[in-house]
Amino acid sequence: MSKADKTRALILDAATEEFAAHGIAGARVDRIAERSGMSKPMIYAYFGGKDKLFDAVFEVHVIGNSERVPFTAHDLAGYASRLYDDYLADPALMRLLMWKRLEREATGYLYPGLEEIDAQHLREIVGQQRIGTVRDDLKAEDVWSLLIATAATWAQNSITNVAMTSERSTDHQRRKSALIEFMTAALSPVS
């Protein structure tokens, strides 16, 4: 890794912590500079400002999630279970999503520039609906939204209980089993 890449990574790590905790408006570049060990001018040189730095942090986590958890239309319940694991491993992801929704994109699509990724997922869901492995009385867009929301039941945006890595593995396994059973039943073709 080059020195520039290491510097960029240090800034992104510090910015992730800052934005996850304080959002876009509440984040302070001076705290990011202090936490990263870089100067404010260095941060501006690398990212051009706080808003662009948030965009970079957001992209790292969103793209990282899609790379860590490859989409599997033929196993939507298993995909939801793997999302649970990733949300647990990267709690900043959900916090960043919440801040972006609160401060930038109150409605509509949350990932401008990444529409093709979701469009491909929708095409694959439609393909599974056509061959009869996923119920076809729901629009693919609704299947996708329900899948993502259900997988995030215990993530940082939960209104009931946030899963923590410090909990017993049996608790995580119980939730993942419930998630798989629920999604399997919910998405099975209607007789």
Image (spheres, rainbow, N blue to C red):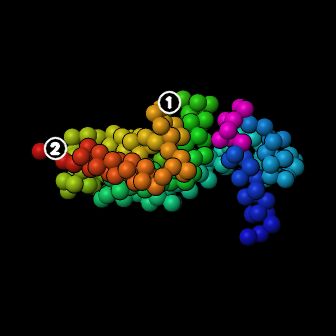
> Residue 52 sits in which quadrant?
top right
Question: SS for tag 1?
Answer: loop
Asked if residue 140 lies in the magenta stretch, the reply is no
Q: Is residue 111 visible?
A: no
Q: Amino acid at mark 2?
A: Val
Q: Is residue 26 shown above or below 75?
A: above
- Looking at the image, is mark 2 or mark 1 earlier in the sequence? 1
Q: Amino acid at mark 1?
A: Thr
Question: SS for tag 2?
Answer: loop
Choose between 46 and 162: the one closer to the eye.
162
Q: Magenta region: which residues? A: 18-26
Q: Answer few, some or many: residues within 10 Å of disc 2's Cα (few below 14, many 20 plus, some between 14 and 19).
A: few
x then y, percent, for residue 12: 71, 52
* Residue drawn 24% across the image and 46% down it: 185
Choose between 190 and 86: the one closer to the eye.
86
x then y, percent, for residue 25: 71, 31
- Residue at label 2? 190
Residue situated furthest bottom in the rendering: 1
Marks 2/1: CA–CA distance: 31 Å
* Label drawn at residue 107: 1
* Residue drawn 26% across the image and 55% down it: 128
